[in-house]
Image: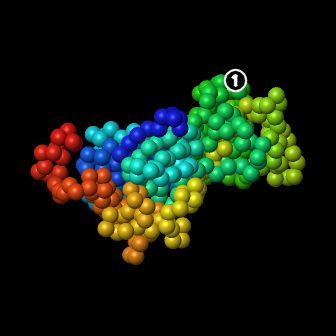
Amino acid sequence: MSSNSSPLQTDALVIGAGPVGLFQVFELGLQEIHAHVVDVLPEAGGQCMALYADKPIYDIPGLPASTGRDLTQRLLQQVSPFKPAFHFQQQVASLQSQADGRWLISTNQGTVFLAKTVFIAAGVGAFVPKTLPLPQLQAFEGSQLFHTLASATSVTGQHLVVFGGDDDAVQSALSALAQSPASVTLVHRRGTLDAEPDVLQAFEEAVAAQQISFITAQISQAQVTQQRLSGLQIEKIDGSTDTLPCDQLWVMLGLSPQLGPLANWGLAMSRKQLTVNTEDFSTHAAGIYAVGDINTYPGKRKLIVSGFHEATLAAFGAAAYLRPGQKVALEYTTASPRLHRLLGV
């Protein structure tokens, strides 16, 4: 993490680590433009990983079938020669032009970049966790309230409440048992759970063995003791209320895309999408490009393969922008010694 007094200086900042953002890093690497990458999610893959990590995709060239997880892993392998710097679980909060033509960008975690070019590959928006409408809980974000298993701290000896009913919620409750918590309670608004059959069977066995409690209810209020979350008041479907001890709360309600601060950056937009010049997918702001589902232009199709095309032309455009007066040669990875050297082949 950097501070405002010492920003991370880079030729390119890519906002979004989905498939198009990752391929943008690759195409920039071929132009010898090093990139930092920021994404609000805890890992690369964007929508592919967040929504259909293990579902098949059939329209990626050369891959008759690929899951979102497999495609992400392949793209990460492809960009590895260029050693991009990733900054996960951070959302870009502000973007300001500088007198020397660079852009000062800061995230909600305090990381600051000074970038010569910016590539917005934010898809349909930043995927942020769905939250509970309880303002009392905001103070415990990151300390006792978590939205992903990867970000949570140890629950050994603690009372854990998991709120949600999909596969992630059920699997998280099961995985917590390995940490020897004081108790594990899964709270869901409905009596049925949406998880894979083998996961449901394991969950039902844990409930039968009294290792996990399953309650159909809504969380209505948080209890705070000495400035720490200590309990949760719940309203059951029969109208009765109860209080659960709670040292950690994992809210697993899935993710939703939000345009967020991007809407306030002063970039030209149409229907919540960035308008671009299709010659190089630049926005009206010098040095800023938009690729993938976040952009719009006549004939736009929201397909991953379209985003790959856009990222390629954007990289060529950035090379011309960063090296004015120099010809940007078209080289082929099959025959170019320079590209072979960059790729380490």
Q: Residue at x 26, y 52 (%)?
A: 323
Question: Residue pushed farthest bottom?
Answer: 298
Residue 70 visible, this angle:
no
Is 304 displayed left or right of 113 in the figure? left
In the shown orientation, is residue 184 left or right of residue 15? right
Q: Between 205 and 97, which is closer to the camera in this rendering?
A: 97
Say what amino acid the circle numbered 1 marks: Gly
Q: Residue at x 47, y 65 (%)?
A: 274
Q: Which residue is mark 1?
A: 157
Q: Estimate the x, y position of residue 12 in percent, counting from the top left.
A: 37, 48
Between 14 and 267, the residue placed more toward the observer is: 267
Residue at the spot 38% in from the left edge and 49% down from the top edge:
116
Residue situated furthest front in the rendering = 99
Task: Tell me how the rendering is colored.
Answer: rainbow
Q: Is residue 73 above or below residue 276?
A: above
Q: Is residue 16 above or below residue 229?
A: below
Q: Position of residue 281 (x, y in %)?
A: 36, 64
Depth check, front residue: 268 or 260: 268
In the image, residue 34 sits, relative to residue 120, either above or below, namely: above
**Along the line of sight, the residue nearer the viewer: 76 or 272:** 272
Which quarter of the figure has residue 20?
A: bottom left
Q: Is residue 238 visible?
A: yes
Looking at the image, the residue that sits furthest to the right is 240
Q: Secondary structure at mark 1?
A: loop
Residue 49 on image: x %, y %: 47, 50
